Image (cartoon, rainbow, N blue to C red):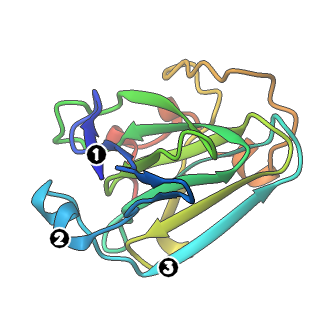
């Protein structure tokens, strides 16, 4: 695996190191030892699949607070998505900064999302499928979220949002949240 640091502290793009021959390629997509060597948490509590019927579908921006903070390893296995993460750690030098990364079935990239990062994505194709390895169990009482269109972040989604859940549409704006956006 090839680990590339992003502009956000502790977040990485992970690319496959392919071994190719006439059959195709083989590559490791996860290795606990390599994750630990890069200072990442390799724990996997759940693996989830998200399927999106329509191009323009948006899911996010979600995170969990302590004691149920989650790491995520996100990979698009069919189609393409634009994945966005926001650093929600008040003590981080990149607090409230965000990045966006295109993940596709063709580029085979994954995005490592550290604990206390809000995460969301937009389907860039019909029938986009996303696989998540998650480091903690989903715990509804500790779930938090941010509005995808919060003017504070000014996230530039690549295409028009055509589908979004009521829950995701109604997350609060950062300005309406307690200091640091990490209410308990």
Q: Residue at x 54, y 54 (%)?
A: 22
Disc 2 marks which residue? 33
Looking at the rendered image, the disc whose residue lies closer to the viewer, 3 or 1, is: 1
Residue 180 located left or right of residue 41? right
Q: In which quarter of the image is the C terminus?
A: bottom left
In the displayed structure image, the side of residue 111 where residue 146 appears, left or right: right
Q: Is mark 3 on a helix, strand or loop?
A: strand
Label 3 belongs to which residue?
46
Q: Where is residue 162 in the image (x, y as percent from the top left)?
A: 87, 34
Q: Closest to the observer: 170 or 61? A: 61
Secondary structure at numbered mark 2: helix
* Residue 110 appears left or right of 146: left
* Residue 112 picture location, percent across and down: 37, 51
Considering only vertical position in the picture, is 144 above or below 153? below
Q: Residue 43 carries which label?
A: none
Q: Is mark 1 on a helix, strand or loop?
A: strand
Instruction: Work out whether 79 lies above or below 140.
Output: above
Q: Residues under labels 3 and 1: Cα distance?
A: 23 Å
Kindly identify the residue that appears in the image at 49 percent across and 79 percent down.
Answer: 46
Find the distance from the CA under tag 1 to the CA under tag 2: 13 Å
Q: Nearer the viewer, residue 17 or 35?
A: 17
Cβ atoms at labels 3 and 2 below 8 Å apart: no
State the CA–CA distance, disc 3 to disc 2: 19 Å
Q: Residue at x 49, y 23 (%)?
A: 153
Q: Residues within 10 Å of mark 2 (few under 14, many from 20)?
A: few
Q: Is residue 18 above or below residue 99?
A: below
Q: Which mark is residue 2?
A: 1
* Numbered disc total: 3
* The furthest residue to the front: 22
């Amino acid at each position: 695996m090839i680990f590339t640091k992003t502009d956000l502290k502790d977040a990485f793009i992970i690319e496959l190191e392919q071994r190719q021959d006439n059959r195709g390629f083989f590559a490791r997509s996860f290795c606990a030892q390599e994750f630990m060597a890069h200072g990442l948490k390799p724990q996997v509590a759940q693996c989830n699949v998200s399927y999106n019927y329509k191009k323009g579908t948006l899911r996010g921006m979600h995170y969990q607070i302590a004691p149920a903070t989650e790491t995520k390893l996100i990979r698009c296995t069919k189609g393409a998505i634009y994945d966005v993460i926001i650093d929600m750690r008040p003590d981080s030098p990149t607090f409230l900064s965000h990045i966006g990364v295109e993940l596709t079935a063709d580029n085979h990239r994954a995005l490592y999302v550290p604990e206390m990062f809000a995460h969301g994505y937009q389907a860039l194709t019909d029938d986009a499928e996303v696989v998540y390895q998650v480091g903690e169990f989903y715990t509804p009482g500790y779930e938090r979220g941010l509005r995808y269109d919060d003017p504070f972040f000014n996230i530039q989604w690549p295409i028009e949002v055509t589908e979004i859940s009521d829950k995701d549409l109604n997350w609060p704006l950062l300005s309406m949240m307690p200091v640091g956006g990490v209410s308990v």
